Amino acid sequence: MNDIYDIIKRYPWLPSLKEYYSEIALKDPAEFISEVFSEQFGNELKQRILELFNAAFDNLEEISEYKTDNLNIYTYLLLKFLLYALDNQMITNRLANLYSKITYNKLIKEKNHSTVYDICQNLGLRIRYYDPPIKYGKIIIKDQHQNLETNFMVHFIDYLKLASNLRDEYRKLVHNSLSDGYLFIQNKRLIRLLQEYVRSKLLIKETEDKASLNVFLEDILKIKEFKEIYDKILAVWTERKEEFEYIFKIDFENNEDIITLYPPCVKEILRKAQEGQNLIHNERLFIVWFLLALDYPVEKIVHVFSTLPDFDREKTFYQVNFAKNKHYTPYKCLTLKSLNLCMAVSYKDELCLTGYGAEELSERKKLAHPLAYTQIKQYRASKWKNYMKKESEKENE
């Protein structure tokens, strides 16, 4: 059994924080913040907070010298207060993604797997721990037999709760080995689920109760040090806001902004990626194949994924390059519908819903492919541009 105080100090998002560090975690926010910055470590804490936000704004996946010392709990709580105060979903997503990735890397490097077991128990998960690892199956890759083994089994109900936001096919129960209601789960996959739990702890939604937020801000912004951090983060946001709210452009004709030509299925995936939401496997495949079909640069496609919680730049670059060399074709509209990726109804898109080619609805052709959507939109935009050009020439005659 590991020292629970030490585990919570390193992983302060655990439920027992309020029990074992109640003198810190249960204080009034203004009182907590005021006392923290009156301590000698106030400046160090300020630097760590700003480093985290700057790294999140730069889409970094890790902070190499991130410390898990006695200030770790203070850092975590201040992040929560700052994200609530900033009330900005895009900033929140970026910070939550970075913090969860840092946690993932720390857990992966844990020398003792029993620490992960203790964390799971602290979360109230029904979990079984085996040391040495238990063998539960075999896989065959190119005629090579490989034993499957793990230190962990987790009850299927708890597994489903942890994996609820990760909708990839391989996470479904039907694709995993079960015994007596418990699922065999490899160490890395369990830690990935814990990463998602940590991410959710920081995903504070933009509040609808602006009155309460204003009261909170009025109270805590009286504290000079906190206001300095808050103002610096907002200054960076203001300076780089356009970069954060990037849109996807390609030089088609005269530097045309092609996002206006994208079908709603593509816009929805890009929106989710921009906000740092998880994308399921089919969404990732489709967006890569679609953008490659438009000769979108590999580096730019990799950047689309840079805000995702599980982003790995080297791995993503390899996979996008692999897809480019294979010349995969994006899903057809029928396939998108079968995969629940069609957004025509949600976006109330006229071209998707009513088709094209004739005035009479009964005579219109139905779209069969998202690339056709882009081609038609581009054709219409080109015709409109030519029309406006001719009208302008007439006026100047």
Image: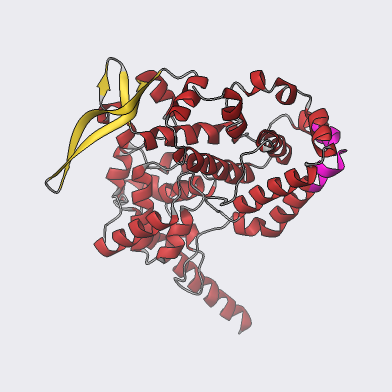
Q: Residue 44 vs residue 241: left or right?
A: right
Residue 357 in the image: state x and y as whole percent: 34, 57
The answer to whether residue 119 is above or below residue 124 is below
Q: What secondary structure prevails in the magenta region?
A: helix
Q: Residue 381 vs residue 80: left or right?
A: left
Residue 273 in the image: state x and y as whole percent: 49, 48
Residue 168 in the image: state x and y as whole percent: 35, 37
The answer to whether residue 282 is above or below residue 138 is below
Residue 279 in the image: state x and y as whole percent: 42, 43
* Residue at 11% from the left image edge and 46% from the top image edge: 143
Which is more toward the observer, 258 or 197? Answer: 197
Magenta stretch encompasses residue 309: no
The residue most toward the bottom is 397
Residue 82 visible in image? yes
Query: Which quadrant of the figure contains the C terminus?
Result: bottom right
The answer to whether residue 206 is above or below residue 127 is below
* Residue at 41% from the left image edge and 43% from the top image edge: 344
The answer to whether residue 254 is above or below residue 48 is below
Q: Residue 155 vs residue 54: left or right?
A: left
Residue 360 visible in image? no
Count up the numbered dots.
0
* Residue at 47% from the left image edge and 63% from the top image edge: 258
Which is more toward the observer, 304 or 157? Answer: 157
The residue most toward the left is 143
Which is more toward the observer, 132 or 300? Answer: 132
Which is more toward the observer, 91 or 382? Answer: 91
The boundaries of the magenta stretch are: 216-228
Rendered image coloring scheme: secondary structure
